[in-house]
């Protein structure tokens, strides 16, 4: 008998992830609040249920791909009592580490097993089945989840105890947010100093400034033809999602008393960028904000500094 998967949250990410499970032969019963997501799911071969509760009743595995921790914890209240004892819950949403640990505890209290398995790779990776999964949970639960995660992704890393998948995700994205700002500031400074973007790229990409934000997602057009800067900053990885992830990181920094001035500042800068109408742009578009603000400050009419 094939494994039945209950899939809740069939949006930009969950939709194609569920479709890949169907293609791999899993029987997927899905539910989403949005009618458009359900329509697409039917086309992808998902059996659509009338409610979240109906989607989990017969499942051996339940996957959630929801906007936030509040959604996950709220939905778990409904579905944990409805699932068969011993069901494996996999939450792939990006949520607060504390919420992930609370969700795990609730699942275990209700007689189930659970892992947190957030992803990186975006909609492109979800569609291609090439996501990276960062997993927190007991070894045997991780091993039970692994075959499904390997259908939806190409890299699956066990990060330790419950919540550690989320911990890895926000630590990685804090590195990414800070490094994108650093790379962008360096390009704008180079421009002010008369250095071409290509020259700075050629030096830094072969020197100690080398990093993913520079060599894969380069924030200026030209040096890396596939980077979003070459298509007017269409994402890619949207600034709104970077804002969300840095907000989760900032929360964890403060809760755990970590002195991380750059992580907190990066969260502020991406929050400002998102809230000034740029949430739909690739996160590398923050270079435009830095450039515009820099120009204003060096305006010769602007004062004697
Ligand atoms: P999305 O908004 O497209 O999808 C979320 C879906 O959940 C929506 O369709 C919504 O209707 C549904 N939903 C909300 N409450 C529900 C409920 N009670 N029952 C059933 N369905 C419900 O968001 P997304 O882009 O798919 O992202 C999902 C998660 O993945 C988020 O936590 C996000 O941070 C994370 N993530 C997204 C990306 C990306 O590139 N989009 C990348 C990595 C991680």
Image: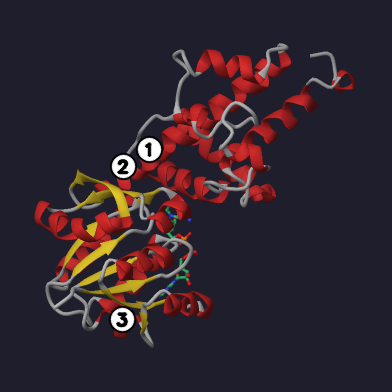
- The residue mark sitting in front, 1 or 3, is 3
Q: In x, y percent, where is residue 175?
A: 42, 33
Residue matched to label 1: 172
Instruction: Kindly identify the residue that appears in the image at 42 percent across and 52 percent down.
Output: 125
Is 46 or 263 nearer to us in this picture?
Answer: 46
Q: Are marks 3 and 2 in contact (CB under 8 Å)?
A: no
Of residues 166 and 97, the one drawn nearer to the viewer in this rendering? 166
Distance from the alpha carbon under mark 2 to that under mark 1? 6 Å
156 sits to left or right of 276: left
The span from disc 1 to disc 3 (Cα, nearest Å) is 33 Å
Q: Secondary structure at mark 1?
A: helix
Question: In the rendered image, which quarter is residue 222 located in?
Answer: top right
Q: In the drawing, does residue 304 fall left or right of residue 213?
A: right
Q: Quadrant of the C terminus?
A: top right
Spot occupied by residue 82 in the image (x, y as percentages of width and height): 23, 82
In the rendered image, which residue does mark 3 sit on? 55
- Percent position of residue 248, x then y: 42, 48
Q: Secondary structure at mark 2?
A: helix
Q: Answer yes or no: disc 3 within 8 Å of ligand 1.
A: no
Counting residues from the start of the chain, the first of labels 3 and 2 encountered is 3
Identify the residue at horizontal 57%, vertical 48% (top origin): 235
Tell me: 118 left or right of 232.
left
**Left or right of residue 77: residue 177:** right
Q: Nearer the viewer, residue 202 or 30?
A: 202
Please say whether residue 101 is visible from this viewpoint. Answer: no
Categorize mark 2 by other alpha carbons within 10 Å: few (<14), some (14-19), many (20+).
some
* Rendered position, 115 above or below 256: below
Distance CA(mark 3)–CA(mark 2): 30 Å
Q: Which residue is mark 2?
A: 168
> Which of the 4 image quadrants contains residue 220?
top right
Q: Contact, CB < 8 Å: mark 2 with mark 1?
A: yes
- Please report whichever mark, 1 or 3, sits nearer to the chain's N-terminal start: 3
């Amino acid at each position: 008998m094939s494994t039945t998967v209950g899939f809740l949250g069939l949006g930009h990410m969950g939709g194609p992830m569920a479709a890949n499970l169907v293609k791999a032969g899993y029987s997927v019963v899905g539910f989403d609040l949005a009618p458009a997501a359900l329509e697409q799911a039917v086309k992808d071969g998902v059996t659509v249920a009338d409610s979240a509760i109906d989607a989990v009743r017969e499942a051996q595995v339940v996957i959630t791909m929801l906007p936030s921790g509040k959604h996950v914890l709220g939905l778990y209240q409904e579905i944990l009592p409805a699932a068969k004892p011993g069901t494996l819950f996999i939450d792939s949403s990006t949520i607060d580490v504390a919420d992930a640990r609370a969700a795990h505890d609730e699942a275990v209290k209700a007689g189930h097993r659970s892992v947190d398995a957030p992803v990186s790779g975006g909609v492109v990776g979800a569609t291609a089945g090439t996501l990276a999964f960062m997993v927190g949970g007991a070894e045997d639960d991780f091993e039970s989840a692994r075959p499904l995660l390997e259908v939806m992704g190409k890299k699956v890393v066990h990060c330790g105890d419950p919540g550690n998948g989320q911990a890895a995700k926000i630590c990685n994205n804090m590195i990414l947010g800070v490094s994108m700002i650093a790379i962008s500031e360096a390009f704008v400074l180079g421009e002010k100093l008369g250095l071409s973007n290509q020259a700075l790229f050629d030096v830094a990409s072969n020197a100690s400034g080398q990093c993913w934000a520079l060599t894969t997602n380069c924030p200026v057009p030209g040096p890396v033809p596939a980077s979003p800067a070459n298509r007017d900053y269409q994402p890619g990885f949207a600034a709104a999602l970077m804002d969300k992830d840095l907000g989760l990181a900032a929360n964890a920094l403060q809760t755990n008393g970590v002195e991380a001035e750059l992580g907190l500042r990066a969260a502020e800068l991406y929050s400002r960028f998102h809230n000034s109408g740029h949430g739909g742009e690739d996160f590398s578009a923050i270079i435009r904000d830095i450039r515009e603000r820099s120009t204003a400050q060096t305006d010769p009419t602007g004062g004697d500094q």
